[in-house]
Image (cartoon, grey):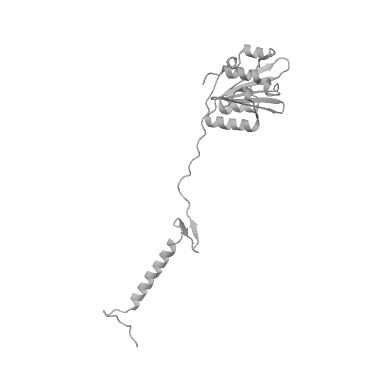
């Protein structure tokens, strides 16, 4: 029977060859992992599966808070100014905002709205003012510009930007000046000039910014 071949120090070559093959296989296995996605793990069939990040998502920025604005209706539009506009108008009893834009101004932007009733026709004029945040004012002005007609007679841009639109039976004015957003809405307004005097009076009565 043949004997194992011995090396110079009396040890067989076979264990050395086996160790070399084990090291080579380990190196090949490590080399295969390094070539893949360092952020992936491997399944039993060798497919890389991305590891989900554990970092929390960046929270979205909170909208700027509303800036409340309160003013007495007799200050927003004085009885003398209302009478000069039309003597048939007086303060509307039990008034509550009805125009959607006026309701938004009051509820979301914490503004003030006042109602004036025509004793003959029953028309109600709603006048509302708010001081929205700068970002909200920019959005509101852009929306008004897109949906309405610019009216330069309400004031000179950029100090005053005025718009008019008629939707259904209502005519509506929106004016942006300084920190103020002014809305004037009524079934009595058919064209921009119908509200011209009221807009001028209201703007003149607002506190200096």
- Residue closest to the eye, 205 or 118: 205
Residue 201 appears anywhere in the view: yes
Percent of width and height locating residue 76: 59, 17
Residue 115 appears anywhere in the view: no
Choose top left, top right, bottom left or bottom right for residue 82. Answer: top right
Percent of width and height locating residue 58: 48, 42
Choose top left, top right, bottom left or bottom right for residue 128. Answer: top right
Give left or right: position of 41 versus 107.
Answer: left
Give left or right: position of 156 versus 60.
Answer: right
Residue at the image point whose x is 36% and y is 72% from the top: 20
Percent of width and height locating residue 37: 46, 58
Give left or right: position of 41 versus 78.
Answer: left
Extreme residue in the left direction: 9
- Residue closest to the eye, 76 or 109: 76
Relative vertical location of residue 130 with respect to residue 43 in this rendering, above or below: above
- Residue closest to the eye, 138 or 151: 151
Extreme residue in the bottom direction: 1
Residue at the image point whose x is 56% and y is 31% from the top: 138
Image quarter of the N terminus: bottom left
Relative vertical location of residue 190 with respect to residue 20 in this rendering, above or below: above
What is the number of callouts on the image?
0
Percent of width and height locating residue 42: 47, 60
Extreme residue in the right direction: 121
Relative vertical location of residue 176 with respect to residue 23 in this rendering, above or below: above
Choose top left, top right, bottom left or bottom right for residue 191. Answer: top right
């Amino acid at each position: 029977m043949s004997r194992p071949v011995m090396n110079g120090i009396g040890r067989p070559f076979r264990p050395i060859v086996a160790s070399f093959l084990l090291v080579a296989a380990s190196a090949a296995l490590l080399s295969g992992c390094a070539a893949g996605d360092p952020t992936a793990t491997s399944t039993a069939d060798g497919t890389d599966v991305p590891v989900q990040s554990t970092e929390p998502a960046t929270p979205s920025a909170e909208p700027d808070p509303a800036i409340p604005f309160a003013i007495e209706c007799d200050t927003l539009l004085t009885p003398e100014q209302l009478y000069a506009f039309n003597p048939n108008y007086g303060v509307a009893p039990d008034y509550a905002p009805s125009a959607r834009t006026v309701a938004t101004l009051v509820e979301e932007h914490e503004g003030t709205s006042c109602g004036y009733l025509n004793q003959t026709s029953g028309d109600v004029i709603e006048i509302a003012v708010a001081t929205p945040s700068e970002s909200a004012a920019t959005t509101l002005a852009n929306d008004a510009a897109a949906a309405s007609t610019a009216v330069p007679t309400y004031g000179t841009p950029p100090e005053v930007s005025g718009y008019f639109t008629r939707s259904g039976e209502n005519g509506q004015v929106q004016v942006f000046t300084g920190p103020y957003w002014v809305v004037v809405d009524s079934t009595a307004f058919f064209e921009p000039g119908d509200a011209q005097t009221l807009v001028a009076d209201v703007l003149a009565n607002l506190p200096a910014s």
